[in-house]
Amino acid sequence: MNASDYPPPPEELPDPDDDMPSSVGVATMSEDGTLRLKLRTVGPRGEIGEALMVVKPGEARYASMRAHLAGLEPGGAIAIPPFPPKAIDPDSV
C-alpha cells in the first residue's frame, strides 16, 4: 500500500475521556495463571484494532495486569476495564 491509500490523519486527536468504553475486551486466566487478553478498539473514523496479549506468571507486567483485572480467577473470564491514560516518553518511542 502507498501512503495515499490511507486516510489523512485527523486534525485533532480525539479526547480520550469522550465516550470512554466500559470494556476494551475480554480476559481469561488459565489454570496455570496465564492471562489472555483479547483487546478491541474502534477509532474515531470506524477503524478497528484488535490484539491478543498473553502474559505469563513471572513476566514483568504480570502483577500490574493482575491488579487491573481484579477478580479474575483461574478458569474464569471477565470484561477488561479501560486502561488509565499513560504519558508516553517521546525518547522511548
Image (tube, helix red, strand yellow):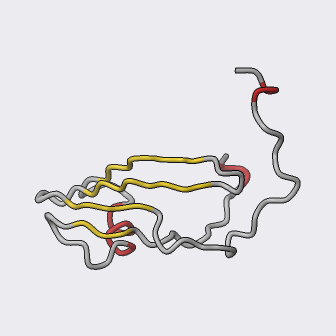
Quarter of the image with the N terminus in it: top right
Furthest residue to the top?
1
Return the residue found at the far front: 46
Residue 34 at x, y percent in the picture: 22, 55
Give the x, y percent position of residue 72: 25, 72
From this viewpoint, which residue is outermost toward the bottom?
Answer: 71
Quadrant of res 25: bottom left
Q: Where is residue 37 in the image (x, y as percent from the top left)?
A: 35, 56
45 lies above or below 68 = above
Where residue 40 appears, as percent x and y from the top left, is: 48, 54
**Left or right of 58: which side holds 13?**
right
**Please, is residue 68 above or below residue 7 in the view?**
below
Residue at the far left: name it.
Answer: 31
Say how many tags the image has: 0
Classify residue 87 as left or right of residue 84: right
At x 24% / y 58%, what residue is drawn?
57
Q: Residue at x 35, y 75 (%)?
A: 67
Residue drawn 67% across and 75% down? Answer: 17
Residue at 63 percent of width and 47 percent of height = 47
> Is 11 located above or below residue 65 in the figure?
above
Residue 70, quarter of picture: bottom left
Q: Does residue 82 appear to the left or right of 31 in the view shown?
A: right
